[in-house]
Amino acid sequence: MILGTHRASSDLGSLEPGTHLCALEQGAARLDHVAATFVAQSLAAGDQVLYIASDGQVDDLLRLLPGSLDARHASGTGQLLTSSFDDAYGSSPPEDLATVADGFRAAAAQARKRGFPALRVAARMDPLAGLLGSFDEVVRWERAAGVLQRELGVSSVCLYDAGGLDEGQGAVLALEHDGLAPHLDVPPIATFLAVDEPWGLRVTGEVDVSNRDLLGRMVASRAAITPRLRLDLGEMTFADVGTVARLRSIAATLPDSGYLELTRVPAVLRRILDATGLGHDRLRLEP
Protein backbone atom coordinates (compact mmCIF):
# COMPACT_ATOMS: atom_id res chain seq x y z
CA MET A 1 0.00 0.00 0.00
CA ILE A 2 1.31 3.45 -0.91
CA LEU A 3 2.00 5.62 2.12
CA GLY A 4 -0.65 8.30 2.57
CA THR A 5 -3.38 6.46 0.66
CA HIS A 6 -6.23 4.24 1.78
CA ARG A 7 -7.86 1.23 0.22
CA ALA A 8 -11.50 1.50 -0.75
CA SER A 9 -14.09 -0.66 0.94
CA SER A 10 -14.32 -4.21 -0.38
CA ASP A 11 -18.04 -3.50 -0.91
CA LEU A 12 -17.94 -1.71 -4.25
CA GLY A 13 -21.70 -1.85 -4.60
CA SER A 14 -21.97 1.13 -2.27
CA LEU A 15 -19.28 3.11 -4.10
CA GLU A 16 -20.11 6.81 -4.22
CA PRO A 17 -20.82 7.85 -7.86
CA GLY A 18 -17.83 9.69 -9.30
CA THR A 19 -15.23 7.86 -7.20
CA HIS A 20 -11.83 7.76 -8.94
CA LEU A 21 -9.82 4.74 -7.77
CA CYS A 22 -6.46 3.38 -8.86
CA ALA A 23 -4.65 0.07 -8.67
CA LEU A 24 -0.86 -0.08 -8.43
CA GLU A 25 0.08 -3.74 -8.56
CA GLN A 26 3.14 -5.73 -9.56
CA GLY A 27 2.37 -7.73 -12.68
CA ALA A 28 -0.53 -8.39 -15.00
CA ALA A 29 -2.00 -11.27 -12.99
CA ARG A 30 -2.60 -9.12 -9.90
CA LEU A 31 -4.11 -6.36 -12.03
CA ASP A 32 -6.40 -8.93 -13.67
CA HIS A 33 -7.78 -9.88 -10.25
CA VAL A 34 -8.33 -6.26 -9.19
CA ALA A 35 -10.09 -5.58 -12.51
CA ALA A 36 -12.29 -8.66 -12.12
CA THR A 37 -13.28 -7.62 -8.58
CA PHE A 38 -14.26 -4.12 -9.73
CA VAL A 39 -16.12 -5.30 -12.83
CA ALA A 40 -17.98 -8.13 -11.06
CA GLN A 41 -19.20 -5.98 -8.17
CA SER A 42 -20.11 -3.08 -10.47
CA LEU A 43 -22.20 -5.35 -12.70
CA ALA A 44 -23.85 -6.92 -9.65
CA ALA A 45 -24.84 -3.42 -8.49
CA GLY A 46 -26.75 -2.93 -11.76
CA ASP A 47 -24.44 -0.39 -13.39
CA GLN A 48 -23.12 -0.49 -16.92
CA VAL A 49 -19.38 -1.27 -16.98
CA LEU A 50 -16.81 -0.40 -19.63
CA TYR A 51 -13.52 -2.34 -19.52
CA ILE A 52 -10.72 -0.69 -21.51
CA ALA A 53 -8.04 -3.27 -22.21
CA SER A 54 -6.39 -5.41 -24.87
CA ASP A 55 -8.15 -8.45 -26.32
CA GLY A 56 -5.99 -10.75 -24.21
CA GLN A 57 -6.74 -8.81 -21.04
CA VAL A 58 -10.47 -8.95 -21.80
CA ASP A 59 -10.22 -12.73 -22.23
CA ASP A 60 -8.41 -12.99 -18.89
CA LEU A 61 -11.11 -10.91 -17.23
CA LEU A 62 -13.92 -13.09 -18.57
CA ARG A 63 -12.18 -16.19 -17.24
CA LEU A 64 -11.92 -14.64 -13.77
CA LEU A 65 -15.50 -13.38 -13.46
CA PRO A 66 -17.67 -15.70 -11.34
CA GLY A 67 -19.87 -18.06 -13.32
CA SER A 68 -22.89 -16.98 -11.32
CA LEU A 69 -22.59 -13.50 -12.83
CA ASP A 70 -23.31 -14.69 -16.40
CA ALA A 71 -20.87 -12.38 -18.17
CA ARG A 72 -22.08 -13.59 -21.57
CA HIS A 73 -25.58 -12.36 -20.73
CA ALA A 74 -24.22 -9.03 -19.44
CA SER A 75 -22.28 -8.55 -22.67
CA GLY A 76 -25.36 -9.35 -24.73
CA THR A 77 -27.48 -6.68 -23.02
CA GLY A 78 -24.73 -4.06 -23.14
CA GLN A 79 -24.32 -4.04 -19.38
CA LEU A 80 -20.70 -5.11 -19.90
CA LEU A 81 -18.83 -3.27 -22.66
CA THR A 82 -15.20 -3.61 -23.72
CA SER A 83 -12.91 -1.35 -25.72
CA SER A 84 -9.28 -1.22 -26.74
CA PHE A 85 -7.14 1.60 -25.35
CA ASP A 86 -6.75 3.14 -28.81
CA ASP A 87 -10.51 3.12 -29.45
CA ALA A 88 -11.20 4.75 -26.10
CA TYR A 89 -8.41 7.34 -26.00
CA GLY A 90 -7.03 7.53 -29.53
CA SER A 91 -3.72 6.45 -31.03
CA SER A 92 -2.17 9.93 -31.12
CA PRO A 93 -1.94 12.59 -28.39
CA PRO A 94 -5.22 14.50 -28.08
CA GLU A 95 -4.98 18.16 -28.96
CA ASP A 96 -7.22 18.95 -26.02
CA LEU A 97 -8.36 16.79 -23.10
CA ALA A 98 -11.81 18.27 -23.65
CA THR A 99 -12.17 15.98 -26.67
CA VAL A 100 -11.72 12.91 -24.49
CA ALA A 101 -14.02 14.42 -21.86
CA ASP A 102 -16.77 14.84 -24.46
CA GLY A 103 -16.46 11.16 -25.30
CA PHE A 104 -16.98 10.13 -21.70
CA ARG A 105 -19.91 12.53 -21.30
CA ALA A 106 -21.52 10.85 -24.28
CA ALA A 107 -20.82 7.38 -22.85
CA ALA A 108 -22.34 8.30 -19.49
CA ALA A 109 -25.44 9.71 -21.19
CA GLN A 110 -25.74 6.59 -23.35
CA ALA A 111 -25.66 4.36 -20.27
CA ARG A 112 -28.66 6.21 -18.85
CA LYS A 113 -30.47 6.04 -22.20
CA ARG A 114 -30.03 2.26 -22.13
CA GLY A 115 -31.67 2.00 -18.72
CA PHE A 116 -28.65 1.77 -16.42
CA PRO A 117 -28.30 3.90 -13.28
CA ALA A 118 -24.68 4.85 -13.99
CA LEU A 119 -21.50 4.03 -15.89
CA ARG A 120 -18.37 2.60 -14.30
CA VAL A 121 -15.02 2.25 -16.08
CA ALA A 122 -12.04 -0.03 -15.47
CA ALA A 123 -9.04 0.89 -17.64
CA ARG A 124 -5.56 -0.56 -18.17
CA MET A 125 -3.54 2.65 -18.16
CA ASP A 126 0.02 1.54 -18.93
CA PRO A 127 -0.13 2.83 -22.54
CA LEU A 128 -1.07 6.33 -21.33
CA ALA A 129 2.46 7.67 -20.82
CA GLY A 130 3.38 6.66 -24.37
CA LEU A 131 0.29 8.38 -25.72
CA LEU A 132 0.76 11.64 -23.80
CA GLY A 133 4.56 11.76 -23.95
CA SER A 134 5.55 12.15 -20.29
CA PHE A 135 4.69 11.15 -16.76
CA ASP A 136 3.86 14.77 -15.91
CA GLU A 137 1.16 14.71 -18.59
CA VAL A 138 -0.22 11.48 -17.12
CA VAL A 139 -0.56 13.21 -13.74
CA ARG A 140 -2.30 16.17 -15.36
CA TRP A 141 -4.63 13.76 -17.15
CA GLU A 142 -5.53 11.93 -13.94
CA ARG A 143 -6.20 15.22 -12.14
CA ALA A 144 -8.57 16.34 -14.89
CA ALA A 145 -10.22 12.90 -14.99
CA GLY A 146 -11.03 13.08 -11.29
CA VAL A 147 -12.81 16.41 -11.73
CA LEU A 148 -14.72 15.14 -14.77
CA GLN A 149 -15.82 11.91 -13.11
CA ARG A 150 -17.20 13.71 -10.09
CA GLU A 151 -19.12 15.97 -12.46
CA LEU A 152 -20.57 13.02 -14.39
CA GLY A 153 -21.01 10.57 -11.51
CA VAL A 154 -18.82 8.02 -13.34
CA SER A 155 -16.76 5.80 -11.04
CA SER A 156 -13.58 4.15 -12.26
CA VAL A 157 -10.44 2.24 -11.45
CA CYS A 158 -7.22 3.12 -13.29
CA LEU A 159 -5.05 -0.01 -13.45
CA TYR A 160 -1.28 0.55 -13.49
CA ASP A 161 1.50 -2.05 -13.43
CA ALA A 162 3.72 -0.75 -10.62
CA GLY A 163 6.66 -2.61 -12.13
CA GLY A 164 6.64 -0.17 -15.05
CA LEU A 165 6.81 2.95 -12.85
CA ASP A 166 9.90 4.75 -11.60
CA GLU A 167 10.49 5.16 -7.88
CA GLY A 168 8.00 7.59 -6.37
CA GLN A 169 5.70 7.72 -9.37
CA GLY A 170 3.18 5.35 -7.81
CA ALA A 171 2.75 7.63 -4.81
CA VAL A 172 2.23 10.64 -7.10
CA LEU A 173 -0.44 8.79 -9.08
CA ALA A 174 -2.19 7.60 -5.94
CA LEU A 175 -2.54 11.19 -4.71
CA GLU A 176 -4.58 12.02 -7.83
CA HIS A 177 -7.13 9.35 -6.92
CA ASP A 178 -9.72 8.90 -4.17
CA GLY A 179 -8.17 5.66 -2.97
CA LEU A 180 -6.78 2.27 -3.93
CA ALA A 181 -9.10 -0.34 -5.40
CA PRO A 182 -9.69 -3.39 -3.20
CA HIS A 183 -8.19 -6.69 -4.24
CA LEU A 184 -10.18 -8.68 -1.70
CA ASP A 185 -13.32 -9.81 -3.50
CA VAL A 186 -16.27 -10.09 -1.13
CA PRO A 187 -19.15 -11.43 -3.26
CA PRO A 188 -22.25 -9.24 -3.01
CA ILE A 189 -25.33 -10.85 -1.50
CA ALA A 190 -27.41 -9.97 -4.56
CA THR A 191 -26.91 -9.38 -8.26
CA PHE A 192 -29.03 -7.14 -10.51
CA LEU A 193 -28.63 -7.86 -14.22
CA ALA A 194 -30.46 -6.14 -17.05
CA VAL A 195 -32.78 -8.10 -19.35
CA ASP A 196 -33.72 -6.72 -22.76
CA GLU A 197 -36.51 -9.07 -23.82
CA PRO A 198 -38.87 -8.75 -22.15
CA TRP A 199 -37.58 -5.44 -20.79
CA GLY A 200 -36.64 -5.57 -17.12
CA LEU A 201 -34.07 -7.19 -14.87
CA ARG A 202 -33.13 -10.40 -13.11
CA VAL A 203 -32.54 -10.47 -9.37
CA THR A 204 -30.36 -13.11 -7.74
CA GLY A 205 -29.69 -13.55 -4.02
CA GLU A 206 -30.81 -11.61 -0.95
CA VAL A 207 -32.27 -8.10 -0.93
CA ASP A 208 -32.49 -6.26 2.38
CA VAL A 209 -31.68 -2.90 3.97
CA SER A 210 -28.06 -3.14 2.82
CA ASN A 211 -28.79 -3.26 -0.91
CA ARG A 212 -32.44 -2.42 -1.57
CA ASP A 213 -31.37 1.04 -2.77
CA LEU A 214 -29.38 -0.64 -5.56
CA LEU A 215 -32.46 -2.59 -6.64
CA GLY A 216 -34.64 0.51 -6.42
CA ARG A 217 -32.38 2.69 -8.55
CA MET A 218 -32.04 0.02 -11.24
CA VAL A 219 -35.81 -0.57 -11.40
CA ALA A 220 -36.34 3.20 -11.62
CA SER A 221 -33.69 3.53 -14.36
CA ARG A 222 -35.27 0.77 -16.43
CA ALA A 223 -38.75 2.21 -15.88
CA ALA A 224 -37.59 5.64 -17.06
CA ILE A 225 -36.97 4.10 -20.51
CA THR A 226 -39.98 1.78 -20.71
CA PRO A 227 -42.50 1.89 -17.84
CA ARG A 228 -43.53 -1.74 -18.28
CA LEU A 229 -40.97 -3.97 -16.59
CA ARG A 230 -40.63 -7.64 -15.91
CA LEU A 231 -38.67 -8.55 -12.76
CA ASP A 232 -37.46 -12.14 -12.79
CA LEU A 233 -37.24 -13.12 -9.10
CA GLY A 234 -36.78 -16.84 -9.57
CA GLU A 235 -33.30 -16.76 -8.00
CA MET A 236 -34.14 -14.31 -5.22
CA THR A 237 -33.57 -16.11 -1.93
CA PHE A 238 -34.70 -13.39 0.50
CA ALA A 239 -36.53 -10.05 0.54
CA ASP A 240 -37.61 -7.90 3.47
CA VAL A 241 -40.67 -5.70 3.95
CA GLY A 242 -38.68 -2.58 3.03
CA THR A 243 -37.78 -4.10 -0.34
CA VAL A 244 -41.42 -4.86 -1.15
CA ALA A 245 -42.40 -1.36 -0.04
CA ARG A 246 -39.77 0.12 -2.36
CA LEU A 247 -41.10 -1.83 -5.35
CA ARG A 248 -44.64 -0.72 -4.50
CA SER A 249 -43.59 2.93 -4.31
CA ILE A 250 -41.95 2.73 -7.73
CA ALA A 251 -45.00 1.00 -9.22
CA ALA A 252 -47.23 3.74 -7.79
CA THR A 253 -45.28 6.42 -9.71
CA LEU A 254 -45.65 4.71 -13.08
CA PRO A 255 -48.14 6.03 -15.66
CA ASP A 256 -51.51 4.29 -15.92
CA SER A 257 -50.21 2.20 -18.81
CA GLY A 258 -47.13 1.10 -16.86
CA TYR A 259 -46.55 -1.77 -14.45
CA LEU A 260 -43.99 -3.90 -12.66
CA GLU A 261 -44.61 -7.56 -13.40
CA LEU A 262 -43.00 -9.86 -10.86
CA THR A 263 -42.34 -13.33 -12.25
CA ARG A 264 -41.21 -16.55 -10.58
CA VAL A 265 -42.07 -14.85 -7.28
CA PRO A 266 -40.52 -16.58 -4.24
CA ALA A 267 -42.72 -17.64 -1.35
CA VAL A 268 -41.11 -15.16 1.04
CA LEU A 269 -42.24 -12.21 -1.09
CA ARG A 270 -45.76 -13.57 -1.49
CA ARG A 271 -46.02 -13.95 2.29
CA ILE A 272 -44.94 -10.32 2.79
CA LEU A 273 -47.56 -9.09 0.34
CA ASP A 274 -50.28 -11.18 1.98
CA ALA A 275 -49.35 -10.00 5.47
CA THR A 276 -48.80 -6.30 4.78
CA GLY A 277 -51.27 -5.33 2.07
CA LEU A 278 -48.49 -3.66 0.08
CA GLY A 279 -50.02 -4.65 -3.24
CA HIS A 280 -50.80 -2.14 -5.97
CA ASP A 281 -52.67 -2.23 -9.28
CA ARG A 282 -49.42 -1.59 -11.13
CA LEU A 283 -47.50 -4.19 -9.13
CA ARG A 284 -48.49 -7.43 -10.81
CA LEU A 285 -47.60 -10.96 -9.77
CA GLU A 286 -47.31 -13.78 -12.22
CA PRO A 287 -49.70 -16.54 -11.10
Image (tube, grey):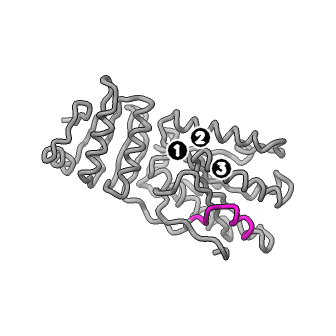
The residue that appears at 30% across and 35% down in the rendered structure is 251
Amino acid at circle 2? Ala
Question: Mark 2 highlights which residue?
Answer: 108
Secondary element type, mark 2: helix
Question: Mark 1 highlights which residue?
Answer: 118
Residue 180 in picture, x, y percent from top left: 61, 66
Residue 239 in picture, x, y percent from top left: 26, 52
Query: Disc 2 versus disc 3: distance between alpha carbons?
Result: 15 Å
Instruction: Say which quadrant the N terminus sits in.
Output: bottom right
- Answer with left or right where residue 244 lies relative to residue 48: left
Residue 58 in picture, x, y percent from top left: 61, 52
Taking depth in this image into account, of 230 and 119 the one nearest to the observer is 119
The residue that appears at 70% across and 44% down in the rendered structure is 88
Q: In the image, which residues are magenta?
A: 170-181
| 9, above or below 268, in the image | below
Q: Earlier in the sequence, mark 2 or mark 1?
A: 2
| 8, above or below 123, in the image | below
Question: Mark 3 highlights which residue?
Answer: 52
